[in-house]
């Protein structure tokens, strides 16, 4: 399967997704907007993954590539591709689907538990969602649910943490792909965001338990397996 991913900054890459894709025999290509990489023809990919980044979906004046990126995401959605959006990626897809993206009441940075939505059916993507899982978060904005989308997960600080659309499009505002190394890189590059606030942990707290990363990487594999199965239909 041909997986293409969109990367916004060098310190937010695929994390645990890359070894999973390689071990399952999928090809990986990327467009790095910070290096002005071109976008491929939509016909050349089967699956699109959109990574996170510190910018906002509204930063089109300082990040003009956001305009073309959203057109490309729209092409992928309308072209029947499987799509996975993470953090900024989730917000971009929400916007492409016509939903409002806005500043959340609180920034959420660190390890916080998620609860499964009551709206979820018992089959399909529900099998990839674990009620009560403690995920890694790093976001200050959120989104309204697009028309036709199903809420997947919520947290105490943020109602809309994840949604599914047409079964083949999954958006996660939180991070399951993060490794200890990629979390440390995020903290190095975005240290100014680690301030005293209700839902922001210290760098020491975030890195204190290495086993948390392997647990969320296992959760990421469930989502990837689900999308892999959908993509093969």
Image: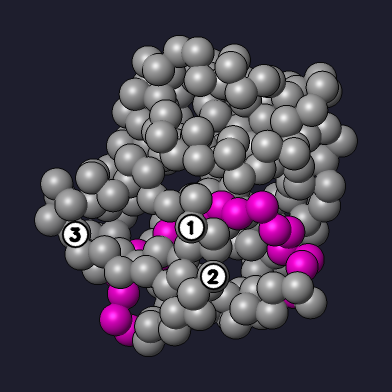
Mark sitting earlier along the chain (3/1): 1
Q: Where is residue 224, by image quadrant?
A: top left
Residue 71 screen position, x and y as percent: 59, 80
Find disc 3 in the rendering and name its residue. Answer: 26
Secondary structure beneath dot 2 equals helix
* Range drawn in magenta: 43-60
Residue 223 drawn at (x, y percent): 37, 40
Q: Nearer the viewer, residue 4 or 127?
A: 4
In front: label 3 or label 2: 2
Question: Horizontal and vertical percent for residue 3?
Answer: 30, 64
Q: How far is the residue under mark 3 from the one under mark 2?
A: 24 Å
Q: Quadrant of the N terminus?
A: bottom left
User: Can residue 197 be seen in the rendering of this structure?
Assistant: yes
Vertical placement of residue 102 versus 214, above or below: below
Q: Residues within 10 Å of mark 1 (few under 14, many from 20)?
A: some
Neighbor class of circle 3 (other Cα within 10 Å; few <14, some 14-19, many 20+) is few
Comparing 163 with 31, the one in front is 31
- Magenta: main secondary structure equals loop
Q: The C terminus appears in which quarter of the rendering?
A: bottom left
Residue ID for mark 2: 34
Q: Earlier in the sequence, mark 2 or mark 1?
A: 1
Residue displayed at 62% across by 78% down: 65
Is label 1 in a helix, a strand or a loop? loop
Residue 10: image tag: 1
Give the Cα separation between the discs numbered 2 and 1: 8 Å
């Amino acid at each position: 399967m041909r997986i293409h991913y969109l990367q916004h900054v060098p310190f937010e890459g695929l994390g645990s997704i890359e070894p999973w894709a390689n071990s399952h025999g999928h090809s990986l290509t990327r467009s790095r907007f910070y290096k002005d990489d071109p976008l491929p023809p939509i016909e050349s990919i089967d699956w699109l993954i959109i990574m996170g980044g510190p910018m906002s979906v509204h930063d089109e004046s300082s990040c003009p590539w956001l305009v073309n990126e959203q057109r490309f995401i729209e092409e992928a959605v309308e072209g029947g591709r499987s799509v996975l959006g993470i953090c900024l990626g989730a917000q971009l897809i929400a916007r492409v689907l016509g939903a409002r993206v806005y500043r959340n009441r609180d920034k959420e940075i660190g390890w916080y538990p998620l609860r499964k939505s009551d709206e979820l059916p018992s089959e399909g993507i529900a099998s990839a969602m674990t009620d009560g899982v403690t995920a890694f978060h790093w976001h200050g904005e959120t989104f309204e649910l697009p028309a036709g989308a199903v809420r997947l997960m919520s947290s105490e600080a943020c109602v809309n943490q994840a949604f599914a659309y047409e079964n083949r499009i999954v958006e996660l505002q939180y991070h399951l792909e993060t490794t200890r190394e990629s979390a440390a890189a995020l903290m190095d590059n975005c240290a100014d965001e680690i301030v005293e606030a209700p839902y922001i942990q210290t760098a020491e707290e975030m890195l204190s338990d290495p086993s948390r990363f392997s647990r969320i990487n296992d959760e990421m594999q469930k989502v990837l397996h689900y999308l892999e199965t959908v993509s093969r239909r």
